[in-house]
Structure formats: structure tokens, C-alpha cells
Amino acid sequence: MACADSSGSRLATGASAEQRIRAILGRMGVGSPLLVMEAEMHLLSDAEMQQFITQGYIQVKADFPGDFHAEVCRQIDAVLEAEGNPGNNIAPRIPAIAQVFAHPAVRGALTSILGAGYLMHPHRYCHLNSPGSDGQTWHKDDYIFDQNIRYHRCRWIMAFYYPQDVTPDMGPTGVMPGRQWYNGISSTDPEQATENELGLCGPAGTVSIVNFDSWHRATANRSDKRRYMLKYQFTRMAEPAAPTWNNKVSHWQPLDGDPHPELSRHVWDWLCGQLCDRPAASSGITRWEDLGADSEMDRLQATYSLGRDQVKGLIEDMRSQAQDQVETNLAHSPTNPQGGNPGEVGPVHALAALGADALDGLLDAAQQGPWSGRAAAMGALATMGKAAAAAVPVLQAALSDDVMWVRRNA
């Protein structure tokens, strides 16, 4: 069954696609698609930003009339039937989709998370979940042209647009709330996984903005309707200098049930343009070896609980783990099926979080020793952001290094 139009559409059947969209916007009093961009943005609140940080998603709505979304759906039906899936070319083939991402609520959410001047990546895709589908396994998407590292600081997001109402039986996109930081889950098989699953449902015009590292999947479509989801990617273009949402509270307010309060606070402070104040000595963490705990939850907590007294040990452990990555042929994992980065090890995140306190040790590690350790140090410096301003000459020089991984991480 094609994408249903339940909006009571008054679209002129002989008109072109562009004429129909303009007519819909005209009935809204907009008159021109360009005026959608000029409307005042609806920025996220502190509570909504807290939800995005801790849960990894937020939903907003491009509240155009039902006619608008029905027309987008009709055009998708026509393009897929006549041409097959156009892949990245879905944007020029159906220009009306651009109005969704120009909507004040969507622009406001993207600006809140990624800052002004964010970039729409050229990769996008129209996902069709057909009636009777079994759904997908759990997975994380690759960064386009860069499958090799995961980021705790959110510089990339995915946006999922539904051009039709999506109910639980239609195979909505499922996510694991709060698991975006994790490289492992109980099972990628949804029948075996024990983590909580949330189906992202909503009326036509719903846009789910999701942390790029979230575990997600298409769920089974048990209805007789096609379910379309337009997936777009966006990336931050500048380090945060101040909050870009409707910020009223300067400090992170811990949430009940958050298993990683220090990590959440770190991301909040970074988004506020603040440098995290780390303790001189580790509280409740005896040694940097806690980063090697069997539990990923414990490792994540250790990463953001270590104090400045652990820098030397972290540097040593970073070098050792980076070399282990090389010796195991950059071991594959569910989050990096093509193989990982020698810099994608726990101490890199811990050192980046320590900021300026780790700068001298990282600069030393970046300029001497085996290439694996240098690549890892480059990754920590680059992730650190503005706290590593003094490292810019070293990072620039590394762009000409003989080793690809050193160049990539710089």
C-alpha cells in the first residue's frame, strides 16, 4: 500500500510538484518557501537539552498542514516507483524536504545542539520499511568516509523525518535510550537484547534528532502501510563558546537514574563553552586501571572521574592499548565492523576530558615513540578542542606524517 493521504488534501492534480508545495505554503500565509527560513527559531529548553544529552534523542515537529507532508509522501511514492531509490539525490529530486529542515522547530533544535552555522552533510537516504518486514538488527551508523572513532562530545547528529503518521505497528525506528556512549550491548539480535527499546513514533512531520552514536534499527512493520523515514545528517562546524539553546541554568542539574552523571556534566559544560573543573586527585577511583574494567559502565564512569593525578598513568596506558589495537589488526567490533582506530581507546577520552592538565603529556606522546601512540595522542588533542590551542602547530605538522592514522587523527 502506498503512503496514505489522510489529510483531506485539496491538491490540484494537474499542478506540478513545486506548484502544489507553493500552494500549501501559501495557505499557511507563508507565501514563499524562503520565508520559512526567516521565521524565528524555536530553541530547545534546558530540560530538552538534558534529555538529548542523557537519552540520546529529542523529537520535534515540522507542523506544516497535513497536505504538505502528504504531498512529500506522494512524491516519494512516484520517485521510488519510477526510478528506484535515488540515495543522496533524494534532496534535489524532492526539494520540498528542504522546507522540513528549515522549519523553525527543526532549525531551532539543530542550532541548540550543534550551534549556529551547522552543516547539512550531503549524505542522506529515504528508508522504506515495507509491510511485513522483519526489521533490522541493532547497529550504529558509520561516519561517512570515517568509520574509525566514536565521540562522547556530540559533533554529529542524525535527523529522522516521517512524512506520514507512524504508529508502533508500522515499523518505526527503534533506539536504545541512554546507550549512545556504549560500544557494546547485550546482543545485536533484537530477540536476545536485554536493553530497553523505544520506538520513535509520531504524526506526519515528526523529526527525531538522534545522537549519531545511538544504537538504532528499523523495527518490524506489521501493518499494511509503507513507512518512509528520511534520514539526514548534520555536523557542528565550530567549538561551543556559549549555550545556543534557551538556556536558563548555568550548571548541570543531575537527573535521577542517570548512570553517568560525570559524563553528562562534561558534555553539558562543553556545550556551554566551559572547561570542566577536574579534581586534583581521583575520587573513588584508585588507579587508571579502572578504565580496563570488564563492565563498560564502570569504564565510562572511570573515564570522567579520574583526576589530574592520573595523567602520567593514562599516557602510559594509552600507548599500551593503542599498540594492542595494532597487534590485533585493529580489531573489528559491532560499532566498527571494518576495524578500529588505534586512537579509539578509553584513555584517549579520559585525557581529552582532562583538558589543559593533560596537554604537556599529550604533546610529548604525540611527537615521539611508536606511531600507534602518536596517533592516539593526536586523537586526544584533536578531541580536546580549544583547550588544546597550544597544540595546533603539532597537529598541523602531523598532517604530513608518513602514517595514515597519525594524519587522520590530527
Image: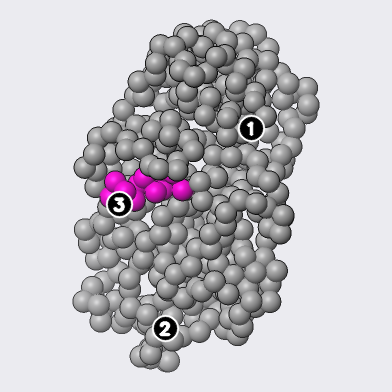
Amino acid tagged 3: Leu
Helix, strand or loop at mark 3: loop
Q: Position of residue 100 (x, y in %)?
A: 38, 65
Q: Dot 2, crowdedness within 10 Å: few (<14), some or many (≥20)?
A: few
Q: Residue furthest right?
A: 328
The residue under label 3 is 44
Q: Earlier in the sequence, mark 1 or mark 3?
A: 3
Residue depicted at x 45% and y 41% = 258
Q: Earlier in the sequence, mark 2 or mark 3?
A: 2
Amino acid tagged 2: Ser
**In front of the other: 299 or 396:** 299
Q: Dot 1, crowdedness within 10 Å: few (<14), some or many (≥20)?
A: few
Which numbered circle lies on residue 16? 2
C-alpha separation, residue under disc 1 versus residue under disc 3: 33 Å
Q: Position of residue 56 (x, y in %)?
A: 47, 48
Magenta stretch bounds: 44-55
The picture quadrant where one finds residue 89 is bottom right
The residue under label 1 is 295
Q: Is residue 49 magenta?
A: yes
C-alpha separation, residue under disc 1 versus residue under disc 2: 57 Å
